[in-house]
Image (tube, grey):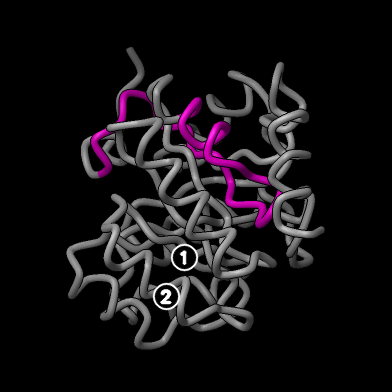
Amino acid sequence: MLHTRVCELLGIEFPVIQAGMGPFTSAELVAAVSNAGGLGSLGAGSRSTEDFRKQLARTCELTQRPFAVNYGVPMLNEEAFALTLAAKPALVSFSLSDPGDLVKRAHDAGILVMHQVTTVRQARQAAERGVDIIIAQGSEAGAFVGTVAGLALIPQVVDAVSPIPVIAAGGIADGRGLAAALVLGAQGINIGTRFLASTGGTHQCRVAAGDSGS
């Protein structure tokens, strides 16, 4: 079994994280990934507070394994974030902007924090904030990307923030991508589109999008 430091940190079997992807995730998808040994992520973005409440409660019903909740910092819903802190998932992940005091608020609730970056400068800032894990997302990703490809970005981020574990993202869809990420120094991978294209994934995500009014 492939085991890295991230597996130990998060209590998962495989170093594979399902990306948040806002309303295109559902409790069923999150639980399926976590129950299979990875880390499922429930996206909080573009959801009403009530829809998020239902999805979070349903996720807790469907899995007893670690899972994450994902937020885009600029559009963070304070009510939803309060619900997340109360639920105490294994991890809260952020993207798109400096997470600021959100890191401390999560840590104070006993929750690990992961932050997604697209530049080395952002990675250093996240490290200064005290995040536990950093996602280095290359320009191959499906959304919220910078201009640097993963092949160049990932090892630079690894070197810049060591010993904080780095997760690779962008254009990764199979075991070869995972192997490449590990060679570049990453401790795991963050995948979005490939999960949506998996059996059952598209159906589940359409249900979630419909429930949130998208």
Q: Secondary structure at mark 1?
A: strand
* Image position of 107 (left or right of 23): left
Report if residue 15 lies within the magenta region: yes
Report if residue 84 lies within the magenta region: no
Q: Position of residue 17 (x, y in %)?
A: 49, 39
**Front residue (pair 183, 94):** 94
Eyeballing the image, is 108 above or below 145? Answer: below
Q: Amino acid at mark 2?
A: Ala
Contact (Cβ within 8 Å) of mark 2 with mark 1: yes
Q: Position of residue 110 (x, y in %)?
A: 17, 64
Q: Secondary structure at mark 2?
A: helix
Eyeballing the image, is 74 above or below 133? Answer: below
Which residue is denoted by mark 2 in the rendering?
Answer: 126
Q: CA distance from mark 2 to mark 1?
A: 7 Å
The answer to whether residue 77 of the structure is visible from this angle is yes
Q: Position of residue 194 (x, y in %)?
A: 71, 30
What quarter of the picture does the C terminus occupy? bottom right
Eyeballing the image, is 59 above or below 149? Answer: above
Q: How many marks?
A: 2
Q: Amino acid at mark 1?
A: His
Which residue is denoted by mark 1 in the rendering?
Answer: 115
Q: Residue at x 56, y 56 (%)?
A: 136
What quarter of the picture does the N terminus occupy? top left
Q: Residue at x 55, y 28 (%)?
A: 178
Q: Quadrant of residue 118?
A: bottom right
Q: Which residues are magenta?
A: 10-33
